[in-house]
Every structure is written in C-alpha cells, then in structure tokens.
Image: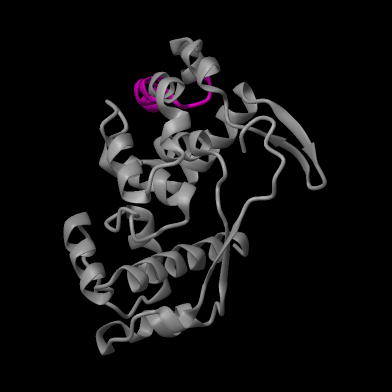
Amino acid sequence: MEPGHTDPPPVAYASPIRLPYDDAMQPLVDELCRLGTVQRLTNTSLWDAITTALLRHGVPLDRARRTHRAYYTAYGRTVDTPAGSLALVPSPDRVLGLSEDGFAAVGASTARTALRAAAAAYRVNGARWQHLAPESLVRHLAAVDGIGATAAALAAADFTSDYAIYPHGDLTLRTWASRAAPSLKLPSTDHEFEALWRRWAPDRLTLHTLTLFTLTWGAHVRAHA
C-alpha cells in the first residue's frame, strides 16, 4: 500500500476450468481443483512489490517472512486497521538513509545493495513504471543493478496479478507443487522445472492459472499450519 492510497485493491479471479489437463500432471490438477475459484487481492503498491521480492528472493520462505516483518516494523509507517496495526513498506527515501547496521539489525544485510539500488531507481522511474505492460515492467525492473530477472518477475506478477510472467522455476513454486502432488517426480532445478511447467501449460492463460493456483494452494497450507 502506498502512503495516502485509500482505494480498495482490485480482485483478480481465476477459475479451475482454466487449469491445464494432462495425464502426467493429473494428481496436481486434482488437488488444485479443490480450491474452487481463486480470488487474489492485487498489490496496489509497486514499491511494496519490489521490496517484498528483493527480501524473499533466494531466501527460505520462513526466514524471508521474518525479515520482511522486522524490516517493515522497524522502518515503515504504521497504520491502524480493523485487523490491528499494519506496518507499511519503508519509503525509498527511508531506505536510502539506512546505515549498514540498520539493515543488519533486521536481518536484511544480504538485500541492502539491491534495496538501495531499487530505491534510487524507483524515485526516478516509479511513476512511469506503474503504467507499463507486465512484460515491459519486468524488463525495466530487471535492468536495475541488483534487482535481476527473477526478482523483477516476482515483483511484476505481484503488482499486476499476471502470473504468466512469474519466474516459473522459483523455489517457492517448486516447493508447493511438490507438496500438493507428492506422487509426481518433479525436477529439482530451476531450469528443468520451468521447462516442464511450460510444457504442461503451453499458453498464457493456462500458465497464469496453473501458477496462481499452485501458489494459492501453498498460501492455504501456511494459513492452516
């Protein structure tokens, strides 16, 4: 959420009828269909999406969540909501003013260079980036030193709710797919998994749907753990 933003976030819907069907992946499709229609709140803050992607990229999920919470609580503005206090993303200016010790205090040292580079670029380009098409947004973000292609795709998917542009070899996606369908023999490397995922979902709509459903399945697992 951007400071001062009051409009409710748009909701993206996905129906299981759009999932791909293939005998080789049927155990996964069967499990995902149990979710019914998926609804996702789109992230209305591109800066929040970028920050979240940089904090989670290449980091185990539990650790990334802890760092995210600590970073936002320590350096972001806190607002009251019906569900309780909510810490917002630290502003680009706040990030550029943080010391090495400031990043280290919340476990974000490994992301500090990327966060600083992203903050500097966002101050100049953020308003324009928000109006780019999904693929173009990925390209522009990936061109910033320290962000890279994977984090750029993570951020762009979060901001646009277009999961055809998600990095389909991402560890989180591989993890939830394996847990949703443990009988499947899924590749363990990014490249091989992404190639298989795209064979299973060869067009843009099914790729988006399969990816969003799998990530949503994982979110439900976490929520009920």
Q: Quadrant of residue 188?
A: bottom left
Q: Which residues are magenta?
A: 105-118
Q: Foreground residue, 208 or 80?
A: 208
**Does 88 sit left or right of 153 as displayed?**
right
Determine which quarter of the picture holds residue 142.
top left
Quadrant location of the N terminus?
top right
Image x and y of residue 135, in percent: 31, 49
- Along the viewing direction, whichever of 81 and 157 lies nearer the viewer: 157
Q: Can residue 119 be seen in the rendering of this structure? A: yes
Question: Residue 167 at what x, y percent from top left?
Answer: 30, 53
Q: Main secondary structure of the magenta part?
A: helix
Q: Position of residue 193 (x, y in %)?
A: 22, 63
- Percent x, y of residue 107: 48, 27
| Image vertical order of residue 136 relative to residue 201, above or below | above
Left or right? Give the position of 204 relative to 103: left
Q: Is residue 100 left or right of residue 222?
A: left
Is residue 113 found inside the magenta-colored segment of the image?
yes
Name the outermost residue toward the right: 82
**Residue 192 position by quadrant:** bottom left
Q: Residue at x 38, y 27 (%)?
A: 111
> Who's the residue at 59% across and 62% down the image?
225
Q: Is residue 178 magenta?
A: no
